[in-house]
Amino acid sequence: MKKTTIFLKEFLFILLCIVYFSDSIFGQTNPLLKFKSKLKVSGEIDNNIGEDYKQSISDKALKLFTNTEASGLLPKNTYYKVTMNGGLRAYSVYQRENRFIGNVTGSLSKLLIGNILLGINGTLFYDKYNDNSRNNNSYLGEGFISIPKRIIFIGDIDLYYQNFDTNYKYNKFFNFTESRYFISIGRKINSRTSFSVFTRLGKMDYERNAFEKKSENNFYYKDEFQCDRSSDIGINLQYFRKFLIQAILLHRNNISNSYGFSFIEKRLSVIFGRKIFRNYMMKLYFDLESKRYKDPSEIFIIVDLNEDKEQDNRSIVELSRNINENIDFEVRFEWCRNESRFRNLYYSKYLFSTGFSYKFY
């Protein structure tokens, strides 16, 4: 109960920040600052809270979520944006799985000659569990440039460089740093349809030694740290008329110097959204994944401590209703089959939630 109280204090701190800034900003017409915030409260049923591939335990949870954004224009065509998110999930029985997640993102971009956009983003993540076993902090640094089609006639080009770092407080074995290079080339087919192709190269450096298989049940550690290199290629199609549909097809090849971590992955993601009645919105999400490891093995290899980082196969149906300009009501159902913390062993679960959200403008 004491740890749950600590979680609530952290969440209430974010909530008080929202109230303070909203009181200072609402009613002002400052062209250099736009402020918006959202508070969401919901109840959830989770039939596999531990995301275990063997035995599932169900429980009910209270979920609180806040999102706050402040953005505006600075001199010389410079745009800034600061975002703060905080989320709390508190279970009624299995409180060791209670979790608090927070992140703060800052971005700065500048419009150059020819509508070229140059920018940087930075995000700090905070992830805390009631039992403290999986607590971790992460940061993401990103630089990007967007070049419109009228300059390079093959299409709109986006170039990104990202550096991502994760540190577990009590288990350094899973710490890693990742560098990513991303390029996307897109075109508008017509006023409603856009199409893009993209590729990404990544390199993950772990703070643990790689290991190799010597015989059937005999493994040894190498005199080098584990290093994974990945290459992605994909296509992205979007169509918008009275409804929005987006489809992403991805092929990934991951090569590791540690036994059991090399794989080939294919993934299809589909997002659909439509206003079905005057005040109702329906959203559908689908992810289908095929993942094949290159090293056949029956041993239990732990790929990560947090299972929810792997979103492999899932279906989500979301229905929301605008009660008024500030209040929304939402019903959400999710089914997923994801890889557990153990390689090639999958768990299934469903989540059902209902709740309200309030928008501050």
Image (cartoon, rainbow, N blue to C red):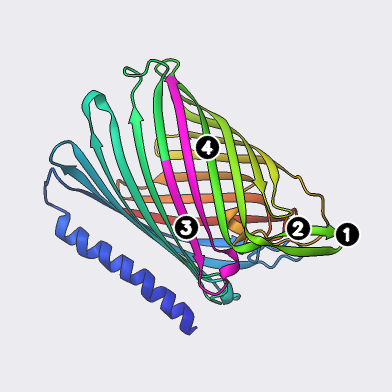
Q: Earlier in the sequence, mark 2 or mark 3?
A: 3
Q: Earlier in the sequence, mark 4 or mark 2?
A: 4
What crowding class fits label 2: few (fewer than 14 Cα within 10 Å), some (14-19), or many (20 or more)?
A: some
Q: Do the residues labelled 1 and 4 touch (CB within 8 Å)?
A: no
What crowding class fits label 3: few (fewer than 14 Cα within 10 Å), some (14-19), or many (20 or more)?
A: some
Q: Magenta stretch?
A: 161-187
Disc ID at residue 191: none
Find out whether residue 181 is within the magenta segment: yes
Would you say 282 lies left or right of 345 here?
Answer: left
Q: Mark 4 points at which residue?
A: 200
Would you say 326 lies left or right of 285 here?
Answer: left
**127 w.r.t. 254: above or below:** below
Q: Residue at x 55, y 75 (%)?
A: 170
Disc 3 from disc 1: Cα separation: 34 Å
Disc 3 from disc 4: Cα separation: 17 Å
- Residue 300 is at least partly visible in this image: yes
**Quarter of image, res 297:** bottom right
Q: Mark 1 points at which residue?
A: 216
Q: Which residue is drawn at 42% across and 78% down?
A: 6
Q: Position of residue 113 (x, y in %)?
A: 21, 26
Q: Position of residue 338 (x, y in %)?
A: 67, 52
Disc 1 from disc 4: Cα separation: 35 Å
User: For this rendering, which residue is in front, 304 or 103?
Assistant: 304
Find out whether residue 69 is within the magenta segment: no
User: For this rendering, which residue is in front, 5 or 200?
Assistant: 200
Kind of residue at badge 3: Asp
**Quarter of image, res 235:** top right
Q: Residue at x 49, y 48 (%)?
A: 179
Q: Do the residues labelled 4 and 2 touch (CB within 8 Å)?
A: no
Q: Mark 2 points at which residue?
A: 212
Q: Earlier in the sequence, mark 3 or mark 1?
A: 3
Q: Name the residue under label 3.
A: 165
